Image (spheres, rainbow, N blue to C red):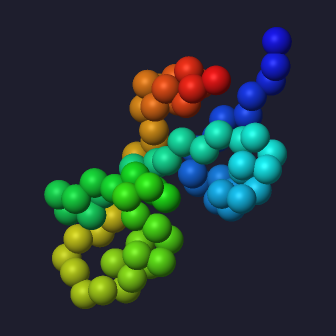
Amino acid sequence: MAIQVITDSTSDIPPETAKELGIRVVPIYVRFGDQLFRDGVDIQSEELYRMLTAPSHWHPATSQPTPEAFKAVDNEY
């Protein structure tokens, strides 16, 4: 039985490093108002930081990935 490392995107492991080491990264959810993004999929760090500094009445909220999201990554192997 092989060991697989799966983490969420708050680990901030660069994609190249994750691929090189075989680490699977599941994105967390970031919500700005009624917009929901998957970290590193629907929104990249640069865009996230831009939104944080832009004048807005929305404050971001984050949510952990669902158990189903982790299971889906595990099932890819």
Front-lying residue, 47 or 66: 47
Task: Give left or right: position of 36 versus 43.
Answer: left
Q: Nearer the viewer, residue 33 or 69?
A: 69
Q: Position of residue 13 (x, y in %)?
A: 69, 57
User: Which quadrant does the N terminus fall into?
Assistant: top right
Q: Is residue 14 left or right of residue 61?
A: right
Residue at 25% x, 87% y is: 55
Q: Is 47 situated above or below 23?
A: below
Quick one: 10 or 13, which is closer to the camera? 13
Quarter where residue 25 is shown: top right
The part of the image, by quadrant, that contains residue 24 is top right
Q: In the drawing, does residue 26 fall left or right of residue 14?
A: left
Q: Position of residue 69 (x, y in %)?
A: 46, 31
> Which sits in the foreground, 45 or 53?
45
Query: Does the rendering let one see residue 4?
Result: yes
The quarter holding residue 77 reads top right
Q: Residue at x 56, y 21 (%)?
A: 75
Query: Which residue is at a point 30% across and 86% down the rendered structure image?
Result: 54
Q: Is residue 1 left or right of residue 19?
A: right
Q: Is residue 62 visible?
A: no
Q: In the rendering, at what x and y percent does residue 47 appear?
A: 40, 75
Q: Residue at x 75, y 40 (%)?
A: 22
Counting from the top left corner in percent of width and height, residue 38 is at 40, 52
- Count the marks: 0
